[in-house]
């Protein structure tokens, strides 16, 4: 179950606006698909961009604005973003529960100035150095480092893997 | 250095003194999931080989979001929860019992507790002086199995409220006003602490409304010091012995203090598609409404139904406006029947439905048509929230909702009071 985190990510940016809610990512009208995550993933973010679930490629990035993932506690939201192959979510800021859930399911979430990134820009991200290269623009951005506890959980492949490994929290 | 309520409660549960910014592992008193998040929590526990509950009598699985089930897949999801409850001895709150947050304050959470719930509005219980916060399925699954969680001790923003509400203005108007002022991410990662003479005089039901919506400003929880009102509420629920005084130190350090004079507030409405998109009801007056929904963990308590019933007594809903009423719990429902409110609603043309989340989550019981407008007492108006991205959701107090149901358009409740 534990997948080793890959430090070098490369893919294309899918740009979204501010306030992308968990209802945009995994809407309530599909509540019945919550026990069928691969099926739910076929609808990921379709209420924000109907093209996204069909066209997203493995390794692509979701690039949001302010307060990405606001709303519900549904862990299904980051989970189906990860299932769709997305390498990381970048945003100017994240809602708290989404941020925590993303780390728990092993999806990197990076806080950076996403105004600099345009749709379809090619990005290369090194999680270990904290540098985002926008190849299309020839610029470099940095992201706010995660707290150590989250890096530990992310490196273990998520919270379930962390607990399976140690039988308890081993964060200090 | 003085401590905030959040620092005091988390410190007690971590077994050491803590300050904002610290990261600790803390004991969990109450853990809860609902039917949208619980099945995944159970699957995660199975995956981790931890099909167990540390505190079964204070672990609760709620069937409230899709109750009764409108779809076979959801019926099967409910079976997962029932099976886990049978295996581990945890409590199961069945179809018809009510919304998790109302049931948690009625029967489970006490001042000084840490509650983690796999539902964002878990912050509701903060009004009892408990550190109550929403998390995802895996976090709560671990909390169920091991009786602990990791927490970052949040900075606290104090919301100090003075002055008396004008007629027709309620706690819901205060919280909508506050979120409009500090915005939907104004308190991200932080705790809110509501204080001041207006809060001290406020009924428990109104305090729950404030704490319920803390997450709509991004907050981790919405805390209120426990006092005589808290004690009376616990006594009314047969838990008077669980009362503890939980207060911040006088010299507690706050990141910010927001002062609000309640006497200056007006009936408020949030317009689509974010909660911080607020206006006064008067400014939006005349907006046609297809559906009015009175209920939810925000405003489905007996005091909320009393206000709505007072306005709807002897009146009829507008012929072009549907009216849906959902009591927040079985006990609220029974009290509303005894008080005659349910008869008032039905005679006014309402569809009254079994306790639960009702149409708020977009699963069933009032999904909007394309372009339709709903005025709801719920806490959230995101695009697609009520089952259709083409629906338009406005949020208000029960008084504004009831008045608008009669007029068929958004109406300042003082027009009918």
Image (tube, rainbow, N blue to C red):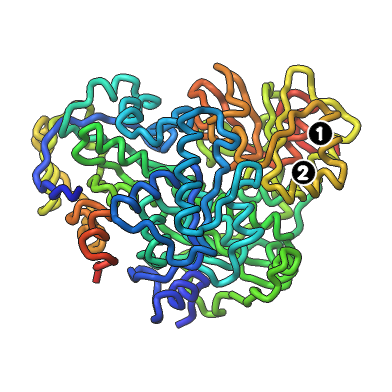
Please tell me which residue lies in front, A94 or B62.
Answer: B62
Outermost front residue: B87
**Considering only vertical position in the picture, is B210 above or below A47?**
below
Q: Is residue B204 left or right of residue A134?
A: right
The subunit letter for the residue under badge 2 reads: B
The quarter of the picture where the N terminus of chain B appears is: bottom left
Of the pair A14 and B415, the residue shown nearer to us: A14
Residue B26 versus residue B298 in the image, above or below? below
Q: Using the rendered image of the protein, determine whether residue B150 is visible from the camera's viewpoint.
A: yes
Give me the residue at 9% from left, 34% from top. A135
Category of crowding for the residue at label 2, using alpha-carbon neighbours closer than 10 angstroms: few (below 14), some (14–19), many (at least 20)? many
Residue B100 image position (x, y, % from top left): 58, 50
Residue B257 placement (x, y as % from top left): 53, 64
- The residue that mark 2 highlights is B305
Q: How many marks?
A: 2
Question: Please, which chain is the residue tagged with disc 1 on?
Answer: B
Residue positioned 14% across, 51% down in the render: A130
- Could you say whether the residue bearing mark 1 is in a helix, strand or loop? helix
- The earlier-in-sequence mark between 1 and 2 is 2
Query: Could you tell me which residue is drawn at 58 percent across and 59 percent down?
Result: B125
CA distance for labels 1 and 2: 9 Å
Picture quarter containing residue A32?
top left
**Residue holding disc 1:** B345
- Asked whether the viewer can see residue B159, the reply is no
């Amino acid at each position: 179950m534990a997948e080793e985190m890959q430090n070098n990510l490369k893919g294309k940016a899918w740009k979204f606006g501010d306030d992308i809610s968990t209802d945009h990512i995994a809407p309530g009208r599909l509540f019945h698909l919550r026990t069928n995550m691969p099926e739910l993933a076929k609808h990921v973010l379709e209420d924000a961009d109907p093209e996204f679930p069909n066209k997203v490629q493995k390794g692509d990035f979701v690039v949001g604005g302010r307060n990405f993932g606001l709303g519900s506690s549904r862990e299904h939201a980051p989970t189906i973003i990860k299932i769709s192959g997305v390498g990381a979510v970048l945003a100017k800021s994240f809602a708290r529960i989404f941020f925590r859930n993303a780390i728990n399911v092993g999806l990197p979430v990076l806080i950076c100035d996403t105004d600099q990134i345009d749709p379809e820009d090619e990005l290369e991200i090194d999680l270990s150095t904290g540098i985002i290269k926008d190849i299309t623009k020839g610029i470099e951005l940095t992201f706010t480092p995660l707290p150590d506890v989250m890096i530990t959980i992310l490196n273990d492949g998520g919270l379930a893997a962390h607990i399976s490994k140690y039988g308890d929290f081993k964060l200090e | 250095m003085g401590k905030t309520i959040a620092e005091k409660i988390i410190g007690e549960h971590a077994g050491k003194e803590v300050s904002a910014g610290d990261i600790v592992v803390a004991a969990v008193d109450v853990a809860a999931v609902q039917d949208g998040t619980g099945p995944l929590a159970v699957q995660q526990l199975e995956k981790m080989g931890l099909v167990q509950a540390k505190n079964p009598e204070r672990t609760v699985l709620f069937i409230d979001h899709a109750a009764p089930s409108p779809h076979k897949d959801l019926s099967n999801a409910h079976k997962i929860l029932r099976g886990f409850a049978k295996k581990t001895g945890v409590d199961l709150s069945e179809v018809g019992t009510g919304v998790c947050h109302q049931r948690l304050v009625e029967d489970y959470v006490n001042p000084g507790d840490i509650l983690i719930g796999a539902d964002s509005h878990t912050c509701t219980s903060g009004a009892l002086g408990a550190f109550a916060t929403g998390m995802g399925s895996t976090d709560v699954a671990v909390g169920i199995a091991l009786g602990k969680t990791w927490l970052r001790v949040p900075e606290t923003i104090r919301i100090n409220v003075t002055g008396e509400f004008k007629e027709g203005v309620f706690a819901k108007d205060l919280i909508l006003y506050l979120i409009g002022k500090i915005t939907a991410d104004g308190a991200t990662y932080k705790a809110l602490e509501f204080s001041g003479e207006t809060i001290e005089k406020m009924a428990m039901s109104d305090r729950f409304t404030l704490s319920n919506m803390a997450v709509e400003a991004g907050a981790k929880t919405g805390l209120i010091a426990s006092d005589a009102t808290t004690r009376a509420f616990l006594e009314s629920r047969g838990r008077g012995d669980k009362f503890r005084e939980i207060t911040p130190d006088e010299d507690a350090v706050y990141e910010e203090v927001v002062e609000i004079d309640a006497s200056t507030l007006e009936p408020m409405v949030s317009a689509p598609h974010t909660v911080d998109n607020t206006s006064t009801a008067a400014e939006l007056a005349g907006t046609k409404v297809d559906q009015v929904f009175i209920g939810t963990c925000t405003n489905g308590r007996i005091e909320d139904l009393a206000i709505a019933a007072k306005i709807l007594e002897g009146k009829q809903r507008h012929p072009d406006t549907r009216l849906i009423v959902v009591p927040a719990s079985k006990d609220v429902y029974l009290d509303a029947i005894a008080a005659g409110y349910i008869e008032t609603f039905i005679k006014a043309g309402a569809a009254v439905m079994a306790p639960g989340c009702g149409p708020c989550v977009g699963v069933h019981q009032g999904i909007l048509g394309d372009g339709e407008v709903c005025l709801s007492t719920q806490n959230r108006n995101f695009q697609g929230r009520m089952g259709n991205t083409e629906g338009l959701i406005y949020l208000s107090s029960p008084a504004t909702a009831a008045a608008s149901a009669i007029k068929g358009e958004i109406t300042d409740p003082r027009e009918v009071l």
